[in-house]
Amino acid sequence: MKNSSPAPILCDLDGVVWLSHEPIAGSVEAIAALREAGHRVLFVTNNSYAKVASQEETLAALGIPAVGDVLTSSGAAATLLKAGQRVLVAGGPGVVEAVESVGAIVAGRTDDGSTQSEQEISDANIDAVIVGFHHTFNFESMRRASAAVRSGAILIGTNDDATYPTSTGVIPGGGSILAAIATASGVSPVVAGKPNAPMGELVRRELKLRDLDSCWMIGDRYSTDGAFAKTIGAKFALALSGVVDQNEATKLQAQHKFALVVKDLMGLAKHLGVAN
């Protein structure tokens, strides 16, 4: 059965709503207009480090109510777990929160400072290692995580983004940490965040929809946001408010045949007829 209500909007954060948490011009007004017209707006982000409430609070500070509307790559990773499974976390507080939210057990963290003998005992029966961005990754973290994977734990990456944008330039992202652990363990990871299927499953659960062809995904990167739209069967709008200019956008659209290129989030609102 087709959904007859206004199309859900899946919205990336960095490069669409904000840049380094500074709102992009018109983004707050565009979200308000979309919601006023009945569109459900979900913020779908590969940020795995922050807890959901922290991201909701950041949005609220910009004038965007977001409680219950933020989906993260940590949450996507947690869809791959079962209650009672023992998890070794190589990531931030957002990963811990997501693991516990599905009834899995945080059996340890690679940066918890325990001794090697304590680690070997606690990590003896690890079911999964989940990797996300964090600042404390080091050789011991890699040794501990890769040892658990070689002993049979599934290796899950919240995302495989090689870099992460900051106000002072790009820094290594969670994907760089994941690549190190995958190399050390000799195992290819299952990656949960955009553009992969587990994030799509998280969206379907939240919207209570199996068919997402009525949805719009708006993002500033085709490699993650556009490819994610393709993965889930949604329409894609590429926003020029982040990392892509008009010339590159034109080439990408010709290559990948996606629906729309817009200046910014307000451009999508105008395309949908909810803003002037």
Image (tube, rainbow, N blue to C red):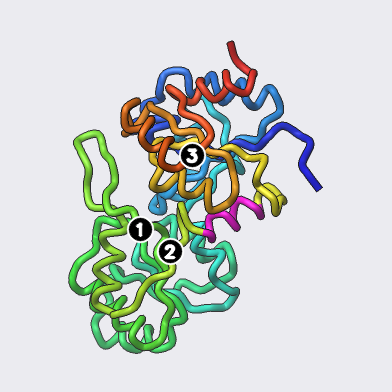
Residue 46 in percent (x, y) is at: 42, 49
Q: Sequence order check: which comes first, mark 2 or mark 1?
A: 1
The quarter holding residue 125 reads bottom left
Q: Residue at x 53, y 59 (%)?
A: 197
Q: Residue at x 59, y 66 (%)?
A: 102
Number of numbered discs: 3
CB under 8 Å between discs 3 and 1: no
The numbered dot on residue 160 is 1
SS class, disc 2? strand
Question: Does the stretch in magenta take in 227?
Answer: no
Q: Using the numbered discs, state the Cα–Cα distance from disc 3 to disc 2 in whole angstroms.
A: 25 Å
In-front residue for pair 161/32: 161
In this rendering, the label closer to the viewer, 3 or 2: 3
Q: Amino acid at mark 1?
A: Asp
Q: Which residues are magenta?
A: 197-205
Q: Sequence order check: which comes first, mark 3 or mark 2?
A: 2
Q: Which residue is mark 2?
A: 191
CB under 8 Å between discs 2 and 1: yes
Q: Residue at x 30, y 57 (%)?
A: 134
Mainly helix, strand or loop, the magenta region? helix
Q: Which residue is mark 3?
A: 257
Q: Amino acid at mark 3?
A: Lys
Q: Is residue 146 left or right of residue 208?
A: left
Residue 228 in percent (x, y) is at: 49, 49
Residue extending farthest front: 254
Residue 50 in percent (x, y) is at: 41, 49
